[in-house]
Image (spheres, helix red, strand yellow):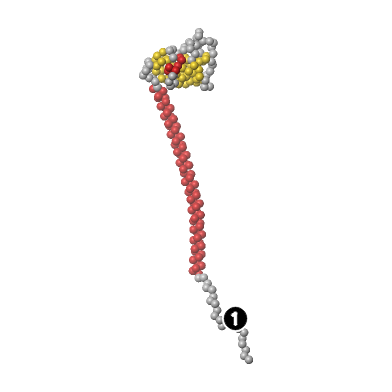
Amino acid sequence: MSYQQPQHPGWGQPQPPAPKKAGAGKIVGLSCLGVVGVFVIIGVIASLFGGTNEGSASGSNPAVTQDAAESGESEGAKADDAKADEAKEESAKDAPVTVTAKKVGFKKSILADGSDYTSVQITIANGGDKDLDVNPLYFTITDTDGGKHTAELGTDEDQIDTVELAPGENITGTVTGKGTFTPKYVTYTEGLFGDGVRGNVS
């Protein structure tokens, strides 16, 4: 009797090939690729935040520019206002009619009914090239509360005369309103119609 050794499974049969180990080159390559990917992600995030900062910075520039523009406009507006005031002063000097006024004491005439009146001394000058009609009825007095007072004829001894001013002439006299009030300005309107010329009461 012959003795046979027990056979182990797989003996005498071809062995399956052992799995191949990844080469060191591939591992290094994958590692580098991962590092590059991380840097790319960091770069994208940095560019996003960097874009936001730049955007906010550029957003702040228009604000600064706008502030500068507004300040420039305000300075320009002030300059325009100054020029307009100068033009008004020059035009007032060269205006066809100028009116100046100041408050004076009431001088009661024999026609006055009591002494409850307010008088304003007026100087009116004809700076135009035509004759100018002056009449106490052509004047109104506006008080500091906005009330308008028409002239009370014959109540003040120094009432302005009814005259015709030639070009270059002027006349001074009083216009009187009924009641006690603080006059603010006087308005002259030739013939009761047309544009009024105002003179502030000093």
Q: Which residue is mark 1?
A: 9
Q: Residue at x 45, y 41 (%)?
A: 65
Which residue ends up furthest to the right in the rendered image?
A: 1
Above or below residue 153? Residue 43 is below
**Residue in front for this viewpoint, 109 or 146:** 146
Expressed as whole percent of the image width and height from the top left, the position of residue 146 reads 52, 22
**Residue in front for this viewpoint, 71 or 185:** 185
Q: Is residue 110 left or right of residue 127?
A: right
Above or below residue 172? Residue 85 is below
Classify mark 1: residues with Cα within 10 Å, few (<14), some (14-19) or many (20+).
few
Q: Residue at x 61, y 87 (%)?
A: 4
From where the camera sits, is residue 104 visible? no
Q: Residue at x 39, y 15 (%)?
A: 165
Expressed as whole percent of the image width and height from the top left, the position of residue 35 reads 50, 61
Q: Is residue 7 left or right of residue 194?
A: right
Expressed as whole percent of the image width and height from the top left, the position of residue 28 reads 50, 66
Which residue ends up furthest to the bottom in the rendered image?
A: 1
Q: Residue at x 47, y 39 (%)?
A: 67
Secondary structure beneath label 1: loop
